Image (cartoon, grey):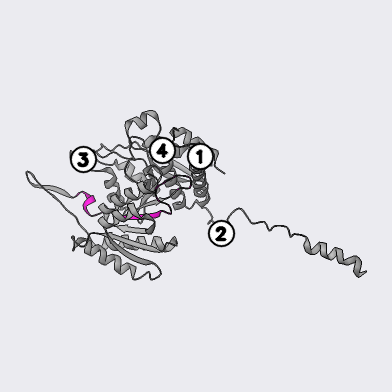
Amino acid sequence: MAKRTLPILKQLLHQRSPPISTPSRSVTYMPRPGDGAPRTVTLIPGDGIGPLVTGAVEQVMDAMHAPIYFEKFDVHGDMKTVPAEVVESIKKNKVCLKGGLNTPMGGGVSSLNVQLRKELDLYASLVNCFNLPGLPTRHENVDIVVIRENTEGEYAGLEHEVVPGVVESLKVITKFCSERIAKYAFEYAYLNNRKTVTAVHKANIMKLADGLFLESCREIASKYPSIKYNEIIVDNCCMQLVSKPEQFDVMVTPNLYGNLVANTAAGIAGGTGVMPGGNVGADHAVFEQGASAGNVGKQKIVDQRTANPVALLLSSAMMLRHLQFPSFADRLETAVKRVISEGKTRTKDLGGKSTTQEVVDAVIANLE
């Protein structure tokens, strides 16, 4: 009896156990009742390539059946002010998606982008600059988040002519605004498992203004002991960005420096056409292409309909997460990254020959 059962035991012992199946869907997100209700988003197509890339977002949202409805307004950068009905729409809907708005050089016309930030108190600008798999760049392992104070400093445009031929441009830095942008940066790092926050400054020269910004950052940093805090002078920062960008994680900056740093980081990581971003305050958020360079584009690109929609598509994924629609955001991001990784459908700025519509079609084809 023992001899008969021995081969059977050996056979049973050598049999492989069936592989344990792992769930393909996340079960960690439990929506609250009513979270699936459709949301209205204010849409500003803007100037130049804006209507092309916002149109791309509309098509992809329709293809996903995303719970988003757009309330569209015709706004252009040469207007003197943002129309009151547009501001009211954003205040009502809380969220806006916008294309680029062209700001005329000189002539006394103020930037509508700056107007929106001030009117809605969108005090934090966030641009995520990272390597996309399949898109060759000079540097690898780049994943930088630039968080920029959005309401004061030189970029606020406080200027006047003292006497003919003499113009005074004011740089106003306050403890209140410096502390809240520092707090936002550290809170972002904490919530997103980021390890380091670097404050960018020029306090060696602007000892009072940038000194106050640094003082505020240091005070907030002391409340987040688990996050490493660094400081770097802005000119050295730019040099380090182009030589060793992978050393940076989260960067917090005053207004003007942040504009320069974010555009530089975007160029290093793959170009302005692929970097997402947004502006957020306590009550409202406006999502747009992360890097301002090229967000309006040249007329030739508009005529040929070859604008790159990737940056605004990824910004839309940020928007979907902001609206508590994480699965739609994941689907959109995954589809965009697949298209980039495959390398078959790319616009000219990424080394391809595809039109905006061909990129949109490829993204929709890769939606799960």
Q: Secondary structure at mark 1?
A: helix
Where in the figure is residue 9, as x and y percent of width and height? 83, 65
Tags 1 and 4 in contact by the CB under 8 Å rule? no
Tell me the distance, in whole angstroms, between the alpha carbons under discs 4 and 3. Answer: 28 Å
First in sequence, mark 3 or 2: give its number.
2
Vertical order, 296 against 132 (above or below) = above
The residue closer to the viewer here, 167 or 97, is 167
Please name the residue that numbered disc 2 is placed on.
28
Q: Report the residue that reaches farthest toward the top.
A: 303
* SS at badge 3: loop
Dot label at residue 77: none
**Residue 32: image x %, image y %?**
53, 57
CA neighbours of label 3 inside 10 A, class few (<14), some (14 to 19), many (20+) = some
Task: Tell me where the magenta segment starts and ends, as one range.
Answer: 132-157
User: What amino acid does circle 4 point to?
Assistant: Asn
SS majority, magenta: loop
Q: How far is disc 1 from disc 4 in space, using C-alphas?
A: 12 Å
Q: Which mark is residue 109?
A: 3
Q: Earlier in the sequence, mark 1 or mark 4?
A: 4
Q: CA distance from mark 3 to mark 2?
A: 49 Å
The CA distance from mark 2 to mark 1 is: 26 Å
Q: Residue at x 41, y 53 (%)?
A: 142
Q: Which residue is mark 1?
A: 363
**Disc 2/disc 4 C-alpha distance (Å):** 34 Å
In which quadrant of the rendered view does residue 296 lie? top left
- Contact between marks 3 and 1 (CB within 8 A): the answer is no
- Amino acid type indicated by mark 3: Val
The kind of residue tagged 2 is Thr
The answer to whether residue 241 is above or below residue 364 is: below
**Residue under pointer 4:** 308
Q: Is residue 140 magenta?
A: yes
